[in-house]
Image (cartoon, helix red, strand yellow):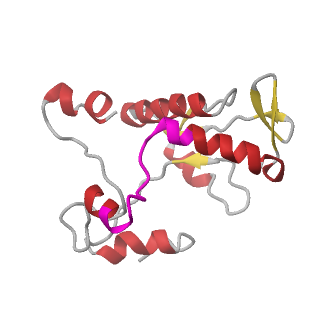
Amino acid sequence: YLNTDVGNALYGVTFGQAYAGMLPQGMLGYQSIAQLNNNTSNAVPTFDLKVAKADWNYTMANDANALGLSMSGGKVLYNGKPLIIPLYIFSADPVDQAGATTWATALATVIPGASFPVVPTAFPTLLGNQVQGSNPMPVYLLGWAPDYPFPTDYLGPMANPVNTST
């Protein structure tokens, strides 16, 4: 994704880089992926479809009934209906479109028969849909930026996501 869709290899410029955690490189408290792995006994999640498939299979074998999941004809069902999880993105954003499409394709290889349609949506609609308890968007992107570059501005909203202000 970073090399082709974002363009790192295509243009020979680093537009994006792999990261883990919430703090950007250069900020007080930042740890690289290697440092995080060293400090957590290699517990930093990575993009690994084999691990994802194993985790999915474990969930289906042990927790499917409690989650309303079942299989029929080789396809996963949620409460008896096909599992469809739309991914909402900003309209007219080719980078988000490419990223969401790549992610949807990867998810579909892990979860048999599920579909993950990418739904480009106008920004005012994304904002209007954010009504607590009735938001129709199961997965959506909404831009966020700190008002000043300090670790609490990045970590606070993740620790208490109900309050996005810092």
The picture places residue 41, in percent across and down from the top left corner, at 38, 63
The picture places residue 150, in percent across and down from the top left corner, at 27, 75
Identify the residue shown where x is 29% and y is 36%.
2
Identify the residue shown where x is 56% and y is 34%.
107
Give the prevailing secondary structure in the magenta stretch: loop
Q: Nearer the viewer, residue 155 or 163?
A: 155
Which span of residues is magenta-colored? 38-52
Side of 53 where 150 appears, left or right: left
Identify the residue shown where x is 41% and y is 47%.
46
Side of 134 where 86 appears, left or right: left
The image quadrant where one finds the C terminus is: bottom left
Q: Is residue 33 above or below residue 158?
A: above
Side of 64 where 149 appears, left or right: left
Image quadrant in which you'd find residue 33: bottom left
Image quadrant in which you'd find residue 149: bottom left
Q: Determine the residue located farthest toward the top in the rendered image.
A: 73
Identify the residue shown where x is 66% and y is 40%.
57
The picture places residue 75, in percent across and down from the top left corner, at 75, 27
Q: Nearer the viewer, residue 57 or 47?
A: 57
